[in-house]
Amino acid sequence: MQQQAFPMGRSDAIVRVNTFVRGVYNWMALGLALTGLIAFLVSSNESLFLFVHRTRLLFFIGEIALVFTLAARINKLQAGTATMLFLLYAALNGATFSYIFVVYTNTLIATTFFICASSFLALSVYGWTTKKDLTGLGRFMMMGFWGILIATVVNFFLHSSGMQMIISYIGVLVFAGLTAYDTQKIKMMALSQPANIGAAAVRKGAILGALQLYLDFILMFQYLLFIFGGSRD
């Protein structure tokens, strides 16, 4: 039986899309792995852990600054600089995430990670395959994100476990919705790439997509951990 071949233009487009999407998920996976490694190493060093805990507000501000720098200036940054900033953010986030190895059991962390990963996969598949435009959902969830961010900053000073639990439940819903929306957005980015796009532009687009999905995953994981294990100081 003769194998049917795609037209050259379509074949090239499929290769570009696959390369871009593979880059997004590879960078996301690397970011998550780096976060987990740094979190474990910091939690294993008491003096380093105490330093991060005492200066966690500065770490938080630094992480926010890196996220907004990448999101707002990705087109003006060199591909290498964008990559470095993404990995730096993942490392800083790992340092602040070190507390989970101190206050939660390894079993709970592993179980929550499995639940989060399974949910993330299902939501990503939905976002990739659905024919429904998720733009409206994405805008609504972004409003929820800003509300969560403000509430989190306020609760940083209040230390209210009840408020943190409410934030956690809302956070899971918000980042579940954003996972589906961001996946669809990344799909549209991949399909709309011009034929003559350069490697540097592909890398920067993949880094931006990886950052979006990384944030969706890591924050959904954190909020699930708060729900299953309780928010502990």
Image (cartoon, helix red, strand yellow):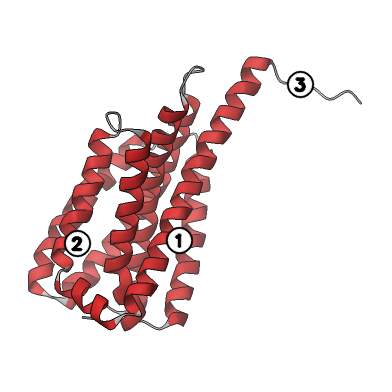
Nearest to the observer: residue 137 or residue 147: 147
**Residue at coordinates 92% horizontally, 26% vertically from top-left?**
1
**Residue at coordinates 30% horizontally, 29% vertically from top-left?**
75
What kind of element bears circle 1? helix
Query: x, y percentage for residue 127?
Result: 47, 43
Nearest to the observer: residue 117 or residue 167: 117
Disc tally is: 3
1 and 3 marks in contact (CB < 8 Å): no
Location of mark 2 (residue): 59
* Residue 97 seen in render: yes
Location of mark 1 (residue): 33
Name the quadrant containing residue 209: top left
**Residue at coordinates 53% horizontally, 47% vertically from top-left?**
125
Tell whether 91 sits left or right of 15: left
Name the quadrant containing residue 233: bottom left
* Residue 226 seen in render: no
Q: How crowded is mark 3: few (under 14 residues within 10 Å), some or many (20 or more)?
A: few
Q: What residue type is labelled 1?
A: Ala
**Residue 5: mark in rendering:** 3
What kind of element bears circle 2? helix
Q: What residue type is labelled 2?
A: Phe
Name the quadrant containing residue 55: bottom left
Q: Which amino acid does label 3 sit on?
A: Ala
**Residue 20: mark in rendering:** none
